[in-house]
Image: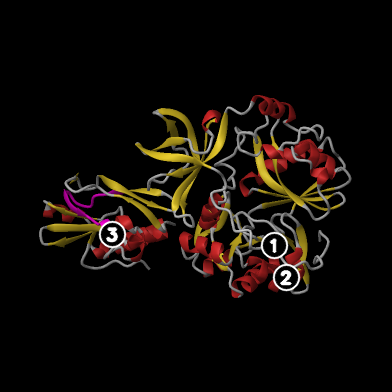
Amino acid sequence: MAKVPSELRYSKEHEWVKLEGATAVMGITDYAQAELGDVVYLNLPPKGTALVQSHKMGEIESVKAVSDLFAPVSGVVAEVNQAAIDSPELVNKDPFGGGWLVKATGIEPGELANLLTAAAYESFLEGLATSGH
Amino acid sequence: MFLTPLNPLHRAAGARMVRFAGWEMPLQYTGILDEHRSVRRGAGIFDVSHMGRLEITGPQALDLLQSLCPTDVAALEDGQGQYTVLCHLTGGILDDCVVYRQGEGRFLLVCNASNRPKLISWIAGWQRRFPGACLIDRTEALGMLAVQGPAAPGLVAEALGTGLLALPRFHLGQGLFQGDPVLAARTGYTGEDGFEVMPAAAQAPALWRALTERGAAPCGLGARDTLRLEAALLLYGNDIDESRDPFSAGLGRLVNLDKGAFLGREPLARTKARGPAERLVGLRMVGREVARHAYPILESGHRVGAVTSGSYAPWLECNIALGYVEARLAEAGTVLQVDVRGRLAEAVVVPRPFYRRSAASGEAAPREPRAASAGA
């Protein structure tokens, strides 16, 4: 079963967000990394990029295929995870820790209400499993 | 959907399953990178029971195959196989396959799963000219397990008999499993030494277990694809199809214009004389962008071709691709660009294969008497 830490918020595109004070840390979920398989390349928005919730913010490439990354919240990119860019397997090994992707500031806390709680995301994953995905 | 005889084993082992050419197949077990390295370092085992196995028999079997294939099938000895293609009347490639001569008037054609229905009707159509040839689809009666890697011959020999070690590349022999004969060919799709063994469907699970217990790592279609790409082996539907002829695809060596009539001979003779307009090339990406199927290839801003297969190469640790470009650009060293979703990524034409196994492994195995001459 994919891990779903309870303190995070989730998007239906399988990104997660964690608030650290006024900064939002974001990445992809354990379910997403398992679905993608071995990650080999990350194309992340550079520092200073304005993100819009649910709009494309970058790309993640596994051996099999490339997928779009969507911003789970709006904000401005304050930091990208250079360690993950250099070693994309971090995203597979530790998607909620060392495999984080982007930190953003200037976020709109109200937008978090548009995201799923851990419990809601878990039910969403169960729905995907029963529909054959 | 077709299920291979090994389907319950894949599911029980927790493999990620995928639908491929009408079959439910394992995509990966532990992960593509991990499985890929297992094959290059030791031995991996793949369920390839979806591959079509067509027997062509009878006094006119050879005549039918000589008409279907541009290679000289008559040159085969008993137990010998050859990589070949079947071409349309246009010279376009209907399928790439391996044809084995099992004995006088007995041939086995191993074809792509996706092309099996098409080939059966194509062959049946031409069979009317050769009433003394008979086509039998053995696909569902036989399993097929590919055991690949430097340690693969040893594992297969332990399970099926050491006599198989003397089997030369592209030859078909016979091993013994639980007292029953099992066809085994010294072939593969990974760039490594190894065997493709064809037990009766009912025996396939026990043979799979015998080989995995001896250390062959279960692998899925994902690693099969990255392994074949490093070895620059073509994938039908990606790198070749009916719109491509053998000369464009770098398979000109398969076209024997001196052997007599065969389907597609005239257009192929013209293409050979004129030279193909486009050629398949190997590309090595300079940066970290991955080229994928159908991405445009450009030279100084102008479109000159398209990628047909591309991936991260797990063993070579770089990004590689196959694609077609205008023939004038096929020289190694040519610098081109690939349009990666709107970004231009530099790519250099390099010689194929991208990966070649060291000559030390396999092939020159101990010379022992052949397990069996050929056939079953």
Q: Do the CB atoms of the residues marked 1 and 2 lie less than 8 Å apart? A: yes
- From mark 3 to mark 2, how far is it between C-alphas? 48 Å
In the picture of the structure, the residue carrying the numbered disc 1 is: B197
Q: Is residue B294 left or right of residue B345?
A: right
In the picture of the structure, the residue carrying the numbered disc 3 is: A83
In the picture of the structure, the residue carrying the numbered disc 2 is: B160
Q: Is residue B271 left or right of residue B321?
A: right
Q: Amino acid at mark 3?
A: Ala
In terms of secondary structure, where does tag 1 sit? strand
Q: Nearer the viewer, residue B28 or B266?
A: B266
Q: Amino acid at mark 1?
A: Val
- From mark 1 to mark 2, how far is it between C-alphas? 10 Å
Residue A65 horizontal/vertical position (percent) = 42, 49
Circle 3 packing at 10 Å, graded few (<14), some (14-19), many (20+), is some
Q: Is residue A78 magenta?
A: yes
Q: Amino acid at mark 2?
A: Leu
